[in-house]
Amino acid sequence: ISSFLFYENTMCTLSDAYEFMNIKIILLGLFTLSFVQCTTHTTDTTIGYKFSNQETLVFEDIDYPEILGDIMQIIKIDSLLLINDYYGDSLLTVFNLNSNKVERKLLGQGEGPNELISPLEVLLSNNNLWILSRPIHQLNHLSTQSIHKTPKLVRDLQVKTEADCFVPLTDTQFVLSGFWKKRYAWMNLQKSDELIEFGEFPDFWEAEKDIPHLSKAMFHQCHFAVNPQKHLFASCSYFVLEIYEYDPSGKKCPTLKFKKQLGKYQYKFSTDEHVVFAKMKEGCDPVSVDIVGTENHIYLLTQDPEQRKQRNILVLDWKGNPVKLLKTGQRVMCFAVDEENQMGYGIIQDPEDKLVSFKYNL
C-alpha cells in the first residue's frame, strides 16, 4: 500500500495527497483490528477441572476372537472398530461389533505393499484414514472405502524428521507437533517443504522459560483431535490443553482460541542439544494420556487423582468448559466414543488387556 500511495502522490495535488493519507490510515486501522481479532484467545488461569456433573461407568466385555496385543488406538466407524496394534502382525485390524468377528487386516508390519513400520498414528478426516508411520516419518492414507474391501495404501510423502504426531485438518492441510522452535508446524500437502511454525511451548512452571525448546518439545508431546464442522482442533499433552481455530481454505495459519493448565508439573531436562532428555519429577499432578473429539465435545483420558493406575474421562465442550466427569474405576488404555448412541468402547487392563463397551449419558 505504501509504495502504491507514494507513486501516485508524486503526480497529484495536495488535497489528493491528504485523501490518500486518510485512506492509508483507515486501511492501517482495519489491518490492526483484523490482527487483534485473529490473535485473541482465552487462557483459563485455574489449574485443572472441577465437575459438578459426574457418572460412574459400567463396562461390558466384548467377545474379541483374538489375543489383543499392545493396542495404541481404537477408532469407530459405523458398526466397525479399527484397532491400531503396536506389536501385531496386523497393525490395523477391522472388527465388526455386530458379528464379533475380525473382518479383515488392513495393514501389515513390514516394508511391502500395504505394510508399514509401527508405531502408527491414525486419524480419521472426511473419507480418509491418515496414517503416520513414526519411525520412518512417512505420511500415508487409506480411503475409508478400503475398510470394506481390499485396501490400497497411498504413500503421500516423507514428513520432516522433527515431526512426532499430527492432525489432518483437511485432505491437504496438516498440523504437526515435534522438535521445532515453535510448538507446531503447519503444512500444506502440496507444498510440504514450506512449513510454517506457530504456537508457544507451555511455561506454566516458573523455571520453564529458560529450558531448551528440544526438552520442552519432548516433555510436552501431544495428541490431537479435530472438529471439521466447527473448524477447530485440540491439542493435549500431559498437563496442557489448547484449542485452535483453523481456516479450511488454508489461507492463514491456525489461531489459538483457548489454553489451560491441567495440572502442576516439573521435570528434569538436558541442556545438551545432542542428548534430548526430559523426565517428570515426583509430586506432579495426574497426567492426561489420550484425547478423542466429536462434533460437540472433547474427551480427555486422565489419571484418577486418588488411584493413579485408574483413569477417568473428562468431557469438555469445544470452548474448554467442563461438561461431565466419567469415572471408570479401571486402567483404560485407549477409547472411542459413539456420541449419537451414547456408547463408548475401550481397552482396559484387567489385568490382561481386553476390549469392552460402556454406556454414558450427556
Image (tube, helix red, strand yellow):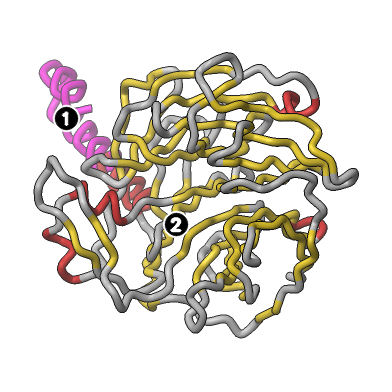
Residue at the outermost right position: 99
Residue range highlighted in magenta: 1-27
Q: Residue at x 49, y 34 (%)?
A: 118
What is the three-letter code of the residue carrying label 1?
Ala
**Which residue is tagged 2?**
236
Q: Residue at x 51, y 80 (%)?
A: 307
What is the three-letter code of the residue carrying label 2?
Cys
Whether residue 272 is visible to the viewer of this picture, yes or no, is: yes
**Which residue is tagged 1?**
17
101 drawn magenta: no
21 drawn magenta: yes
Q: Tell me the element at label 2.
A: strand
Q: Which quarter shows the C terminus?
A: bottom right
Whether residue 324 is visible to the viewer of this picture, yes or no, is: no
Quarter location, residue 322: bottom right
Answer above or below: position of 272 versus 279: above
Answer above or below: position of 119 versus 11: below
Q: Could you classify mark 1 by the number of other residues whose Cα lies within 10 Å: few (under 14), some (14-19), or many (20 or more)?
A: some
Q: Position of residue 251 (x, y in %)?
A: 42, 30
Residue closer to the observer: 214 or 7: 214
Quarter location, residue 190: top left
Please say if the residues under marks 1 and 2 sit with CB atoms less than 8 Å apart.
Answer: no
Q: Residue at x 13, y 40 (%)?
A: 274
Residue closer to the observer: 66 or 133: 66
Q: Tell me the element at label 1.
A: helix
Q: Residue at x 30, y 43 (%)?
A: 198
Q: Main secondary structure of the magenta part?
A: helix
Q: Position of residue 357 (x, y in %)?
A: 76, 60
Q: Could you classify mark 2 by the number of other residues whose Cα lies within 10 Å: few (under 14), some (14-19), or many (20 or more)?
A: many
Q: Earlier in the sequence, mark 1 or mark 2?
A: 1
Q: Position of residue 148 (x, y in %)?
A: 80, 27
